[in-house]
Amino acid sequence: MIARVCHGAIALVVVAALVLQVKIAHDASAVPAGHAVGTLAGTSFAGRLVRVFSFFTVQSNILSAVVSAQLARNPARDGAVWRVVRLAALFGITVTGIVYSTVLARVHEPKGWEQTSSNLAVHYVVPLAMVLVWLLFGPRPRISRDVVLWSLAWPVAWLAYTLIRGEITHWYPYPFVDAATHGYGRVLVNSVAVTAVFAVVALLFAWGDRRLRRDP
């Protein structure tokens, strides 16, 4: 019962934060046209929504909400595809929290209660809650070598999508993938480094999956 409540709470926090993100996108201005890194303003409402859901932060929170909602319904949830999505959510949201708190928080200044609240939820509350709830309730074991490898397809696909869309629209969600400013050589190095971080964190979860208490 406690596990279901915790998983359900994570899903609800993400949904609330996403509602605020959509409101922020709705309220942002479409003019003048703009392509500043990480900003929503400067394009149509549809374009602003695409920008919202192009952030890795938002995608990792959505994955976290999806797997958490499923675990709230069935704490013993399992399945080949589900294992991959669950691990992707875990390492994705963990890296989101680490990178934001150590790097991006210094340059990001949320304004107003909507931005402040959603920022707190997606960058601090959900990352911490996902890791803590996994440590406490699992379910385990769920992570094999194949699961680790397949789970990395998502961040690689996100990087490819970001660079292709950035080339077309001249908008990038984060400075480290801003090829217009840094060039593709630097961005490629950044992308390899970030992918390596994802892999390391995924392997740490796999290690914990083997070492921590297993489900009865």
Image (cartoon, rainbow, N blue to C red):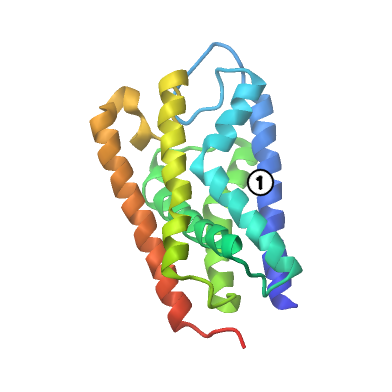
* Front residue of this view, candidates 18 and 29: 18
Q: Quadrant of residue 178?
A: top left
Using a 10 Å C-alpha cutoff, classify the residue at mark 1 as few (fewer than 14 neighbours), some (14 to 19) or many (20 or more). many
Q: Residue at x 39, y 55 (%)?
A: 198
Residue 191 appears at what percent x and percent y? 33, 42
Q: Above or below — where is 194 with respect to 206?
A: above
* Front residue of this view, candidates 45 and 117: 45
Q: Quadrant of residue 3?
A: bottom right
Residue 12 appears at what percent x and percent y? 72, 55
* Kind of residue sitting beneath label 1: Ala
* Front residue of this view, candidates 143 and 128: 143
Residue picked out by circle 1: 17
Q: Residue at x 60, y 56 (%)?
A: 64
**Location of the N terminus (image quadrant):** bottom right
Residue 169 appears at what percent x and percent y? 47, 19
Q: Above or below — where is 208 with respect to 115?
A: below
Q: Residue at x 44, y 47 (%)?
A: 155
Asked if residue 121 shows in the view, the reply is no
Left or right: 168 with respect to 195? right
Q: Residue at x 67, y 75 (%)?
A: 76
Callout count? 1
Residue 69 appears at what percent x and percent y? 71, 60
Left or right: 62 with respect to 204? right
Q: Secondary structure at mark 1?
A: helix
Q: Above or below — where is 54 with respect to 198?
A: above
Asked if residue 163 shows in the view, the reply is yes
